[in-house]
Amino acid sequence: MNFIAAFIRFLIDVLTIAIFARVIISWFPVNPGNRLVDVLYQVTEPILAPLRRIIPRVGMIDLTPMIAIILLRIVAALVR
């Protein structure tokens, strides 16, 4: 059971880093065909898309990445 908990925490850490990287990349003009950007979107979109349907934008600010990271941290704490 300890291995499974460690693996889940590892996945949560990877997803948190991917979401954070996606936020940082969104601040810069990046070629949409960039492979790294494509991978980040494929990994993070299944988490962010459902949240976008629930959480409205605040002006020009998309709060879903922050909410997703908070939820991932809560799940990581529960796994421990």
Image (cartoon, rainbow, N blue to C red):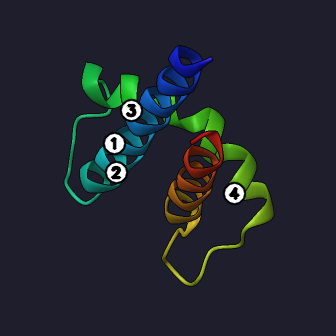
Q: Is residue 2 left or right of residue 14?
A: right
Left or right of 9, for residue 55: right
Image quadrant in which the N terminus is located: top right
C-alpha separation, residue under disc 3 versus residue under disc 4: 21 Å
**Quarter of the figure with residue 28:** bottom left
Disc 3 or 4, which lies upstream in sequence?
3
Q: How far apart are the alpha carbons under marks 2 and 4?
A: 16 Å
- The answer to whether mark 1 and mark 2 are in CB contact below 8 A is yes
Return the residue at label 1: 17
Say what secondary structure mark 2 lies in.
Answer: helix
What kind of element bears circle 4? helix
Q: Nearer the viewer, residue 37 or 3?
A: 3
Which mark is first along the chain, 1 or 4?
1
* Number of other residues with Cα within 10 Å of mark 3, as a class: few under 14, some 14 to 19, many 20 or more: few
Quarter where residue 36 is shown: top left
Residue type at mark 4 is: Arg
